Image (cartoon, rainbow, N blue to C red):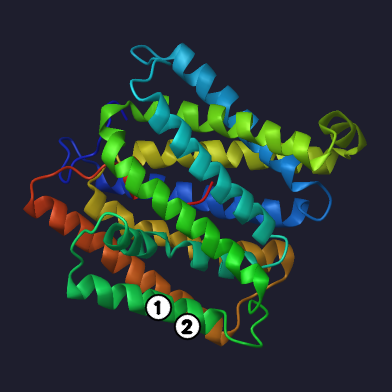
Amino acid sequence: MAAAVAGVNPAGAHPAAGIALIVGAATCFALMDTAVSVIGAFVAIAVVLWLRYAIHALVMALWIGAAAGKSFRTANPRFQLLRGSLLLFSSAMAFTALRHIPVAEFTAIVMLTPLLATLLAWLVLHERVSLPRWALVLLGLAGALVMMRPGSGLFGWAALLPLAAALSNASFQILTSRFAAREDPFTTNFYTGVTGVALASVLLLASGADLGDSLAQMRTPQMALLLTIGTLGTAGHLLLIMAFGKAPASTLMPFQYTQIGVAALAGALFLGKLPDAWSWLGMALITGAGAASAWLTVREAAARQQPVTALAADTVVD
């Protein structure tokens, strides 16, 4: 996407292409989470995080270096550092959670992000929240409680990890919504990788894990899986950016919730785990509340004749 923001009704929109791209992004993220769930039993989380962001930074550096009109220069380095830090924390919580929680249920809880962003905007920024939004927040939280009920396998400390990831991602959304328009999204995506790999390096040293030894001891399938995680994460963000260059946010945002369905399918195919009936109900409540909240966001932006930033619509934890 050439522009930093995707408006409510961008010129030259191609809705079908945009929907295909955003479904592709959702598929990348769901498959990445599934791969993390598999590799987490064999490789230290710090190693997985480092490689995921190292690949991201390398791909974006090559992309910007080869693209005409793109630049590594940022006008808001503090924004880039804080945004990247929030996203890395989200990833760390997510990758740890995926060692204990099924992929589909994890994905649904993380999709509470836009609803938690509403709560943060009210608590921290003192923004006015309408009654419909409060109803959607309560509906989404009810869905999470249905999924995390006692006896579900999600009840316990592990369920706090995706909630922490969603809360951090909600903070990331609010920050992005205020600064993303000042930066090219490809530049921002590059600094996401750079900040992530820098902080992951600190985590790697603190964890005591030896990157060289870990790589040397890996078998070919494990190494391939790690490379796949980094590639899927980077590709997912690129597809997301391109999607918002093809179609208005009002068309695309609900389709991000296809990630829950893809995650359930991937969990069944690769991990042999399917959600139970109560989990499906919780997912449906969260999906409905989140999609409706996204629609309200776009409608309110249209009423104010204010563009919706593509990056602000990013509800995924990468």
Look at 59% across and 67% down and name the residue there. 160
Q: Are marks 2 and 1 in contact (CB under 8 Å)?
A: yes
Compared across the picture, whether 268 is left or right of 88 comes to right
Amino acid at dot 2: Leu
Residue 265 visible at all? no
- Closer-to-camera residue (78/155): 78
Q: Which quarter shows the N terminus?
A: top left
In the rendering, which numbered label is found on residue 285? Answer: 1
Question: Relative to 280, is 106 above or below?
Answer: above
Location of residue 48 in the rendering, given as x and y in whole percent from the top left corner: 72, 42
Q: What residue sits right under mark 2 in the picture?
A: 281
Amino acid at dot 1: Leu
- Snapshot quadrant of residue 88: top right
Location of residue 240 in the rendering, given as x and y in whole percent from the top left corner: 40, 42
Look at 47% across and 31% down and name the residue there. 81
Query: Tag 1's secondary structure?
Result: helix
Location of residue 241 in the rendering, given as x and y in whole percent from the top left corner: 37, 37
Look at 43% across and 16% down and name the residue there. 72
Pointer 2 local density, CA inside 10 Å: few below 14, some 14–19, many at least 20: some
Look at 88% across and 39% down and name the residue there. 218
Compared across the picture, whether 158 is left or right of 129 comes to right
In the rendering, which numbered label is found on residue 36? Answer: none
Compared across the picture, whether 293 is left or right of 44 comes to left
Residue 34 visible at all? yes
Question: Relative to 81, is 257 above or below?
Answer: below
Location of residue 41 in the rendering, given as x and y in whole percent from the top left corner: 81, 56
- Snapshot quadrant of residue 230: top right
Q: CA distance from mark 2 to mark 1?
A: 6 Å
- Snapshot quadrant of residue 139: bottom left
Query: Tag 2's secondary structure?
Result: helix
